[in-house]
Image: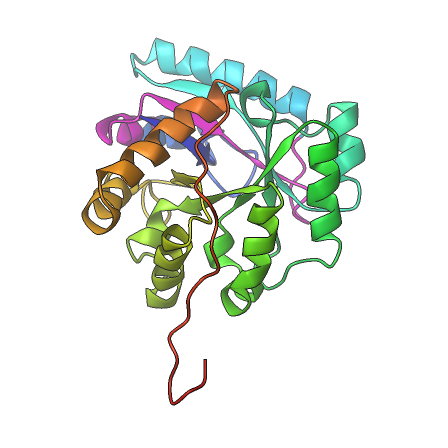
């Protein structure tokens, strides 16, 4: 099993702070059935800046540490970039790091809103030969209130990734409900842990896949699992026809 979103690199952002933290996360990941994990440290989120070359060095160092400690886990390079006006230039200059050097690029929105230029930026990223993957859209307040915006992004070629903890209720019932609606509407393509540590922000990936199998069936389970493999192998992922999120009417109103 592959986890495409994590903060396992030590001391670079709000994830693992020490090498021992990284090793603890790695051991828990292996217990969860994870064999490969993408390290996606934050970049340009207002606090952390982690460029491509630095990430590649840190990933190499962590992989050596895992071998030394007999932990059967492979760390792959990635980056979680907060959408910003310089993103396209940094992608062209090699500062932004696609997932495992593929054509897939993680794009993070601020938690409370979606920037007005987001649609144009996502389009321009595609024109440059990359495929944007919107991370944890279920935790974005504006998308929760206006899911048609997420539909528009997906309809125009972007992909998205839901957090495992969101699906199993770790961020509250509203986010769990919206996560289910996103899956029902074929507006997401990956499930990943976004793990930051082994306590407050753990993996929950196995639990989330069990939830998907129970609520949506084995076809969705296999699609999500296979898409993670396809992404890190730089292959085309499975997409289902996106639909608008259906909201129940109350007294004739939405």
Pick the quarter of the image with the N terminus: top left
Q: Residue furthest front?
A: 241
Q: Name which residue lies at 62% across and 62% down.
A: 113
Residue 51 picture quarter: top right
Query: Would you place residue 86 above or below residue 215 in this image?
Result: above
Q: Position of residue 131 (x, y in %)?
A: 61, 33
Q: Position of residue 200 (x, y in %)?
A: 35, 50
Q: Is residue 222 left or right of residue 214?
A: right
- Residue closer to the observer: 79 or 212: 212
Pick the quarter of the image with the C terminus: bottom left
Q: Name which residue lies at 65% across and 32% down.
A: 50
Res 32 visible: yes
Q: Position of residue 29 (x, y in %)?
A: 30, 30
The stretch drawn in magenta includes residue 34: yes
Query: Would you place residue 144 above or below residue 86 in this image?
Result: below
- Residue closer to the observer: 87 or 231: 231
Q: Which residues are magenta?
A: 26-50
Query: Would you place residue 41 above or below residue 59 in this image?
Result: below
The stretch drawn in magenta includes residue 36: yes
């Amino acid at each position: 099993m592959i986890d495409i979103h994590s903060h396992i690199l030590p001391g670079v952002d709000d994830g693992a702070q020490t090498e021992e933290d990284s090793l603890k996360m790695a051991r828990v990941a292996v217990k969860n059935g994870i064999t490969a994990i993408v390290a996606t440290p934050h970049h340009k989120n207002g606090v952390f800046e982690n460029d491509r070359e630095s990430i590649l060095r840190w990933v190499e160092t962590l992989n050596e540490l895992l071998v030394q400690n007999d932990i059967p886990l492979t760390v792959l390079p990635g980056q979680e970039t907060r959408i910003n006006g310089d993103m396209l230039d940094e992608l062209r200059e090699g500062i932004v790091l696609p997932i495992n050097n593929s054509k897939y690029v993680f794009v993070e929105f601020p938690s409370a809103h979606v920037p007005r230029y987001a649609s144009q930026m996502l389009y321009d990223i595609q024109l440059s030969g990359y495929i944007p993957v919107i991370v944890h859209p279920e935790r974005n307040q504006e998308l929760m209130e206006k899911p048609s915006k997420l539909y528009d992004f997906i309809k125009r070629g972007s992909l998205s990734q839901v957090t495992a903890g969101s699906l199993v209720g770790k961020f509250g019932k509203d986010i769990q409900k919206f996560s289910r609606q996103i899956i029902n509407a074929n507006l997401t393509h990956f499930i990943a842990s976004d793990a930051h540590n082994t306590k407050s922000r753990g993996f929950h990936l196995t639990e989330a896949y069990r939830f998907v199998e129970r609520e949506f069936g084995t076809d969705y389970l296999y699609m999500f699992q296979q898409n993670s493999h396809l992404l890190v192998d730089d292959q085309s992922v499975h997409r289902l026809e996106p639909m608008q999120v259906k909201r129940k009417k109350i007294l004739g109103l939405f």
